[in-house]
Amino acid sequence: MQVGAGIRRHGWAQLLVLAAALTACGQDAEPEQDAKPSARTSTGGATAVASGATVGAPGSACALPVSFATVRDWKAEAIDNSVADSGEFGDLALRQGPVTAVCEIDAKPAGNIGFLRVFTGPPGDAAIRSVLAAFVAAEGKVGEAKYTPFRTGGLDGVEVEYLYSSEFLDEPKQESALAVATPEGPVVLHLGGLDTEEHRAMLPALELARRTLRVG
């Protein structure tokens, strides 16, 4: 595997693994979700999620320039750049555009198929929207990108929603990402998912992260 090839999350082998995981869940998927009613609740038509661990803070699973709350039961794991060629992370190439993957937060323990991944880059003068646009472009065949600025926890950032297409997908699927500028460099959070339906089910995790983002 070559670092710099981008995040090849949509390879045929990984889709087969994800499909197998869904099949294995079978008819037991809904009972498991019903058994955890407090993990995701509806409040006035908006979706609320129960907070879990804080990622990025000292002593957390991932050392980051920022910290943010994760959804309960999502599992964070640091990505060690030194294992880039070991195959430990499958076909994950660590670099995408101007940033490098440093943390992966797995939604499967909470019943979803997908990840919230964190990327960091070196300090520089590039505008944060330019960093995010370069990140999205490096993913490959993307379209209908919609960028929205935001401010949270004293941080200026930009969020994007877009469609990703692949020969292995029946139709384009929605993905989202956000980026903030920190004194240590840009930080990008990316949310994928098996398909658009799965992605939308996990969006509250990205919203929670954005609301709780803080430096350090």
Image (cartoon, helix red, strand yellow):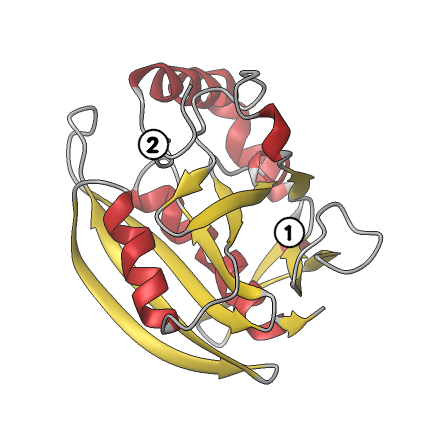
**Residue 171 placement, left or right of 105:** left
Q: Is residue 63 above or below residue 132?
A: above
Q: Is residue 134 above or below residue 84?
A: below
Residue to which mark 2 is pinned: 5
Question: 103 and 22: which one is in front?
Answer: 103
Residue 75 picture quarter: top right
At 64% from the left and 44% from the top, the residue drawn is 74
Q: Report, in whole angstroms, how far the alpha carbon at label 1 lies from the one at label 2.
A: 40 Å
Element on which disc 1 rests: helix
Residue to which mark 1 is pinned: 37
Q: Earlier in the sequence, mark 1 or mark 2?
A: 2
Q: Is residue 42 visible?
A: no
Within 10 Å of disc 1 (Cα), the crowding (few <14, some 14-19, many 20+) is few
**Residue 133 placement, left or right of 91:** left
At 29% from the left and 52% from the top, the residue drawn is 136
At 52% from the left and 65% from the top, the residue drawn is 123
At 22% from the left and 67% from the top, the residue drawn is 146
Q: Position of residue 17 (x, y in %)?
A: 43, 16
Within 10 Å of disc 2 (Cα), the crowding (few <14, some 14-19, many 20+) is some
Q: Amino acid at mark 1?
A: Pro
Q: Amino acid at mark 2?
A: Ala
**Residue 19 placement, left or right of 85:** left
Question: 131 and 49: which one is in front?
Answer: 131
